Image (spheres, rainbow, N blue to C red):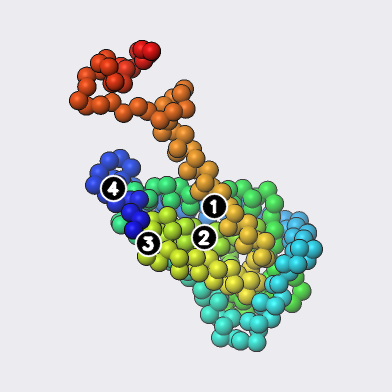
């Protein structure tokens, strides 16, 4: 049976130590607040975002991936499904992600920091994408696409002045941050070898269906969100591996034998002294 990679870290050591709860609340609270302000601030020009959306949809048509009308057409025939998708779209995005963060902090402290870094790094890269290439969602760009949150007044979204949508960037479709965070949740369960790690991948799949049903994203937006998280996680993992190597050698640091004092045959040389050949 595979051994949980974090079991050893629970016993102690800097990587396995649980961060202080108040420091994490401060870090994540301030970070999320700043992200929210920047997310709204980088909202691009509507005409430019719609033009980018048109290019993206034409690309999907060329690739045979333009399935969005089928999804929101199905939801239109099932009103209860459409409403459920709207509440899922808003509620799960924060509740599930936040819940998994707390679980990692409490039960998998050795995995908490690297996975937290993946979540933050992915969100920051997505923010740059929203600023550089604003893309309108199908609900604002495609004829016939529903605006489920407004039509169903999900958490007051029909209110143009103080509703939920007043806190969002309407042209932040690519990459899909909803799908990105859902993939992060599945990745967290997978890398910590949680018993539900295989079933956990159903969560980003369900989220992808929901963002299509509600008219909030294209298929390629979901692909972009998935690639974003996996790429950031891989890049950060490689950076950590490089940082653990001995500076200037590219090789792992030699482990000294505690039974042999430095300088004796078979032991690691003292710092600054080359090994004798």
Callout 2: few (<14), some (14-19), or many (20+) C-alpha neighbours within 10 Å?
many
> Helix or strand or loop: what does disc 2 sit on?
helix
What number is the disc on residue 194?
Answer: 3
The residue at which mark 1 appears reads as 230
Q: Quadrant of the N terminus?
A: bottom left
Image quadrant in which you'd find residue 75? bottom right
Question: In the figure, 77 relative to 102: above or below?
Answer: below
Callout 4: few (<14), some (14-19), or many (20+) C-alpha neighbours within 10 Å?
few
Q: Residue furthest left?
A: 259
The front one of 202 and 150 is 202
Measured Cα–Cα span from mark 2 to mark 1: 8 Å
Q: Position of residue 81 (x, y in %)?
A: 57, 83
Q: Is residue 240 left or right of residue 1?
A: right
Question: In the figure, 277 relative to 184: above or below?
Answer: above
Say whether marks 2 and 1 touch (CB < 8 Å).
yes
Q: Position of residue 271 (x, y in %)?
A: 33, 17
Callout 3: few (<14), some (14-19), or many (20+) C-alpha neighbours within 10 Å?
some
Measured Cα–Cα span from mark 2 to mark 4: 26 Å
The residue at which mark 2 appears reads as 183
Residue lying at 35% horizontally and 27% vertically, measured from the top left: 254
Question: Which is closer to the viewer, label 1 or label 3?
Answer: 3
């Amino acid at each position: 049976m595979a051994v949980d990679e974090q079991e050893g870290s629970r016993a102690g050591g800097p990587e396995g130590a649980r961060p202080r709860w108040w420091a994490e609340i401060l870090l994540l609270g301030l970070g999320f607040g700043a992200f929210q302000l920047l997310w709204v601030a980088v909202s691009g020009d509507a005409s430019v975002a719609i033009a980018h959306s048109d290019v993206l949809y034409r690309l999907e048509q060329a690739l045979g991936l333009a399935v969005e009308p089928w999804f929101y057409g199905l939801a239109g025939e099932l009103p209860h499904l459409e409403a459920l998708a709207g509440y899922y779209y808003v509620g799960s995005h924060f509740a599930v992600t936040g819940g998994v963060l707390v679980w990692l902090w409490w039960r998998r402290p050795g995995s908490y920091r690297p996975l937290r870094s993946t979540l933050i790094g992915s969100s920051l890269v997505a923010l740059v994408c929203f600023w550089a290439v604003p893309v309108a969602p199908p609900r604002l760009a495609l004829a016939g696409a529903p605006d489920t949150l407004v039509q169903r007044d999900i958490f007051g979204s029909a209110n143009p002045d103080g509703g939920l949508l007043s806190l969002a960037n309407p042209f932040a479709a690519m990459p899909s941050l909803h799908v990105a965070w859902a993939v992060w949740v599945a990745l967290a369960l997978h890398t910590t070898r949680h018993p539900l790690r295989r079933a956990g991948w159903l969560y980003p799949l369900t989220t992808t269906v929901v963002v299509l049903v509600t008219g909030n994203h294209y298929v390629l937006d979901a692909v972009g969100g998935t690639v974003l998280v996996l790429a950031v996680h891989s890049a950060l993992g490689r950076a950590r591996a490089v940082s653990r190597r001995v500076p200037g050698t590219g090789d792992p640091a030699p482990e000294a034998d505690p039974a042999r004092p430095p300088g004796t045959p078979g032991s690691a040389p003292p710092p600054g002294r080359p090994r004798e050949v």
